[in-house]
Amino acid sequence: MTRTAFLVPSFRTLAPALIGACLLLSPAAHAGGPPPGDAAIPNPDAQQDAVPALDMTVDWPCVQRKVEKLSVSQMWDGPAIDDVKGWFREKDVSDLIEVLASRRVPVEQGEDAIKKFADAQPADKRDEKLVLLFAGLFDKVNGQRRGVLSGIEKYQKSQKERAKELERQSSEIAKLEGEAPSNESVANQLDQAREQYNWAQRIFQERQQSIPLACELPVLIEERLYAFTRAIRGQMKS
């Protein structure tokens, strides 16, 4: 087979690190109040219009359809791998899989590593080792991808909780606004409540704007796996 080049834009090389940082944010992140000092508090009316819509009825926030598990047949036309096990026992195979599975490694560098690996194999064992390499890589990447899907859903869940908290704060502010004109103490509480609400809303917005970027990560993972699959298959003699 002819080896096909697969170029990934520079954004896609950097994006996984950025998205990973987003997914690692726990629900408690930014839970504190606004920073000390005269931090600028955005206009609540302007922010209300800017907040991206959040569907409170779903756990999957992405436009991309959720696919729980990748299919071997969609990207591999080589020998069946159902009974191909034990890749982790072969040090050269497992070491290369660790390299290929790391999204810090550029696709082109991974493709070069696959070619060097193939060239180093005895002729009568070359295809067997390459099939083992693909089986292990597919298994490894599928596991990574499942973790990413779970992370996106946890992120969405935390956003849903934040949306509920914003709704609670908004109701509390409305209550205080009714009492504030005749009570100076309540007026002070109202100022604090508004400040906390504005800050919480700002954090909600920032996290909400990260969701489309996070949703790209499963796609990037699939594209990398497809590129390496083509590279492995292209090195096989049969």
Image (spheres, helix red, strand yellow):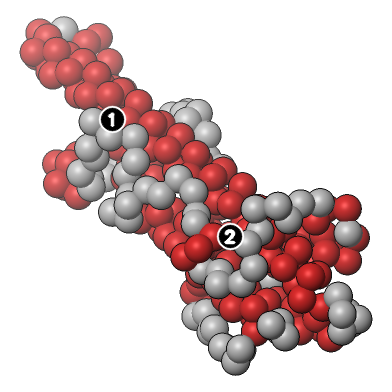
| Number of dots carrying numbers | 2
Residue 221 spot, x, y in % from top left: 54, 62
Residue located 83% across and 64% down the image: 93
Which residue lies under the disc numbered 2? 17
| Quadrant position of the N terminus in the picture | bottom right
Residue 201 spot, x, y in % from top left: 30, 37
Horizontal arrangement in the rendering, residue 223 relative to residue 207 (left or right): right
Residue 128 spot, x, y in % from top left: 79, 70
Q: Quadrant of residue 162?
A: top left
Amino acid under label 1?
Answer: Ala
Horizontal arrangement in the rendering, residue 97 relative to residue 43 (left or right): right
Disc with the residue nearer the chain's start (1 vs 2): 2
Mark 2: secondary structure: helix
Sort mark 2 into few (<14), some (14-19) or many (20+) by Cα contacts within 10 Å: few
Q: Is residue 206 visible?
A: no
Horizontal arrangement in the rendering, residue 233 relative to residue 157 (left or right): right
Which residue lies under the disc numbered 1? 163
Question: Measured along the vertical axis of the image, is residue 201 above or below residue 117?
Answer: above
Nearer the observer, 153 or 45? 153
Question: Measured along the vertical axis of the image, is residue 118 above or below residue 217?
Answer: below
Question: Measured along the vertical axis of the image, is residue 167 above or below residue 181?
Answer: below
Q: Which mark is residue 35?
A: none
| Quadrant position of the C terminus in the picture | bottom right
Residue located 51% across and 68% down the image: 75
Residue located 50% across and 28% down the image: 28
Nearer the observer, 78 or 228? 78
